[in-house]
Amino acid sequence: MKKAVDVIKYLSRSMYWISGTAIAFIVVLTVCDVILRRFRMPISCTYEIVTFVGAIAIALAIPYSTLIGSQISMEFITDKVSGHWQKILYLTTRCLGLGIFIILTWRLFILGNNFKQIGDVTPILEIPMYPVPYIIGIACITECFVLAHSIFLELAKTEDKTIKR
Amino acid sequence: MSTQIIITILILLLLFLLFASGLEIGFSMLLAGFLGYAFLTNFTAALNLVALDVFRVFSSYGYLVIPLFVLMGQIGASAGMARSLYNFAYKLIGHIPGGLAIGTVVAASAFKAICGSSVATAATFAAVAVPEMDRYDYDRRISTGTVATVGTLGVILPPSVVLIIYGILTETSIGKLFLAGILPGILVAFSFVITIYGWSKVNPNLAPRAQRSTWRERITSSLPMIWIIGIFVVVVGGLMIGIFVPTEAGSVGAFAVFFLVALKKELTFKGLVESISSTLGIAGMMLILLAGATVLGHFFAVTRMPFIMADWLSALSVHRLIIMMFIIVVFLIGGSVIEDLAFTVLAVPIFFPLTLKLGFDPLWFGVIVCITNMIGIIIPPMAMNVFVVSGITHVSIGTVYKGCYPYIVGLGICLLIILLFPEISLWLPNLLMK
């Protein structure tokens, strides 16, 4: 169990680093383009690269944002119910979240396959589009792991208490 | 009642049930939109839609503007720019009644020129301004209430994240929206100043005067203000005259702030990593919200509910301002129960067709949405700024709320003024970006 937790944390942290680097790269590339444009030397493919790298940056930030608890939820209602109901609601919502991201992972890989078959590419640099849905899909798998981890953690808490009793 | 209306009502009920159960708001919108679309079309179409919408939102060049403007603010916050601004405002007007609190309003308005987040502004000033006000025996209600409320200026003064998201959702020019927010933002800031001045005149013990600074001290501390005005002019001015698009403006702003704080050696590598980390957390949350809203929006498009509602309400024989007041009440109630940004993402696509049908200006409606958001952020039960300030200053939530109430009156008056005089928000964009 501990190993699995370490792997999930490692995965989402790695994604976070890639995502952070991608954001920094976007800033530098865009600023260079804006400056060079003033000298009539624009970086012609900036739009495509930024869109491509931006998709990676945003997708890979999702598991990290869930892991650090950045996602917004209305906890003030669940805080008012008893501990038992809080646990049930927490597990139910984690399972619902897991369900959504399983569907997303599955359909994003299908979307990637479709792009690959059609041979969809960007207009200027002709970068294949299919890696983008695949990368978002990988981020969704990691999100599934993060959600599954929180379910196991909650269940483990229950087992712990039962053993202690 | 047609099947579409029944399904829409059931899906909306399910959505609020999911919100109440504690499921993340973005996830709730994804799920409800997916289920609704599956009911009205078919399951395979809904499966395809949900993946395609997420792909489109994540790979949209336009949506990248959000993390970039957030990054700009986070770097400024990590580098302690707020402290320098507060230092200047404090030296300028600290000696007048309520001067330290008024200084907080001035500094937060300036800080807002680089930081688009309301909560980040409140958190930053809770750490900077409250200890200073404590030093001069300010009443905790006025110190914490001021900090929680001035944070809301982040919602309306450019580069506001709420305005950016509103612009994306309604396809309204973000540059024009930024301009539309400036005068109402200044009006609101002015109402805060009047509130503090009046409050401390009535009860001088609440906010004792600080010592007067010399003009030399004032001038030497004004440098950060000049830098920030410079960055603001470059970012908003560049957008206005078309040198760059909003996403590029975000990059230029983030780079300019980074360059400035690096030059002044105010940002450590750890601070930079923390800024990027916070940015990614916020961006991940916002983009999931937008993906959820897009899926839900496609469901609403199939039901045609926003348009049916727009037709029905606009056909009523009541003045259009009364309908607008109804919309404002919905936003106030919704925004006080659900997190304000999330409610904006949910409700704007529903009410926007109606406001167009009634002949209201989209820029003006954006400003109205912002002011209702500002009120929602500080009224119970879901008052994010109050929670943040209470957490940082270790003052009870009740005390912070008590400090916020006088400002809500001012905000309400500003809302009424802007409702009756749309020119306040439309004058600048019409003058500069026709």
Image (spheres, rainbow, N blue to C red):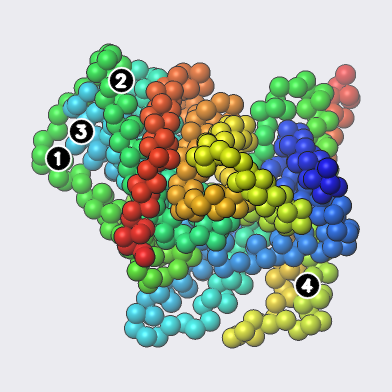
Comparing B111 with B171, the one in front is B171
Comparing B306 with B386, the one in front is B306
Q: Are marks 1 and 4 in contact (CB under 8 Å)?
A: no
In the picture of the structure, the residue carrying the numbered disc 4 is: A112
Three-letter residue code for mark 2 = Trp
Q: CA distance from mark 4 to mark 2?
A: 61 Å
**Position of residue A3 in the picture relative to residue B369 (left or right):** right
Q: CA distance from mark 3 to mark 1?
A: 12 Å
- Look at 19% across and 26% down and name the residue there: B96
Kind of element beneath mark 4: helix
Q: On screen, B418 above or below B51?
A: above
Three-letter residue code for mark 1 = Glu
Kind of element beneath mark 1: helix
Picture quadrant of residue A58: bottom right
Q: On screen, B169 above or below B120?
A: below
Q: CA distance from mark 4 to mark 3?
A: 60 Å
Q: Are marks 2 and 3 in contact (CB under 8 Å)?
A: no
Q: Which mark is residue B93?
A: 3
* Chain of the residue that carries numbered disc 2 in the rendered image: B
Mark 3: few/some/many CA within 10 Å (<14, 14-19, 20+): many
* Chain of the residue that carries numbered disc 4 in the rendered image: A
